[in-house]
Every structure is written in structure tokens, then in C-alpha cells.
Image (cartoon, grey):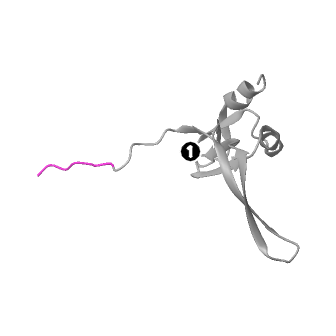
Amino acid sequence: MSEFTHQAAPISAKHVPAFIVKKDDNERTHTHRFLDKNGSIQSKEVKMPGGFIVAFPVKGHSIRVKDEAELKRLGFDKIIPLLDVKSDDADEPVSYLPNSVTSSTKGA
């Protein structure tokens, strides 16, 4: 009987971006809850722009950012560091990528 090595998932890329920014053009519905004059909890549906989604591929997390001003405040408008996930020092950038999402929204 010959031995086969099976791999459940493909080998991940060696260099991955520290974060990925994507513009969400869809409108979102948010439930705003507040107290009225009598102290009762009230709800109101508010429509909001989609904003941006920032994903962190190394950790597998993502966050939603409401607008470009908040994106800049959080520092996601800068160049994107590439991380070497196979090295012992995975937090140290090996290269950088331009941030195409924020540079494309500057003229809008």
C-alpha cells in the first residue's frame, strides 16, 4: 500500500497584507435604541451608508468603519504592510502595498 499525503486546505501565501480595505456601497439599516421622557426603551430604524470593511487576514478578524474620516483616524488610509506569516517575527513588515481604496475615493 502506497502512502499519500492529503492536505485539507491549500498552502497559504507566504506574504499577506496586514489589512485589506474594501468600500461597502450598500446602505445599512441600524437599530438605534434610546430612552424616552418616561424612561422606556424606544427603537428607531436608521439607514446609514455602508462605509468600509477592514479585514485582517492574518488574524481572521474584520471591522466596519463608518466613513473615510474614521478610516483616516484609525490609520487605515496609509500604505499596507506585507507580513511574512511563515517567519518567527510575523509582525515585522517585509514590504508595502499602496492602499487603492482610499486613494480612489480622494477624487470622489
Callout 1 secondary element? loop
Q: Nearer the viewer, residue 72 or 25?
A: 25
**Measured from the top left, where is residue 36 in percent x and y?**
84, 71
For image coordinates 56% across by 45% down, the residue present is 85
Majority secondary structure of magenta residues: loop
Up the image or down, 41 lies above or below 47; here it is below
- Residue 74 in which image quadrant: top right
Residue under label 1, please give it. 85
Q: Amino acid at mark 1?
A: Val
Which range of residues does the magenta coloring cover?
1-7
Q: Nearer the viewer, residue 57 or 7?
A: 57
* Quarter of the figure that contains the C terminus: top right
For image coordinates 73% across by 31% down, the residue present is 102
Label 1: few (<14), some or many (≥20) within 10 Å? some
**Measured from the top left, where is residue 73 in percent x and y?**
83, 44
For image coordinates 78% across by 26% down, the residue present is 106
Left or right: where 100 falls relative to 86: right
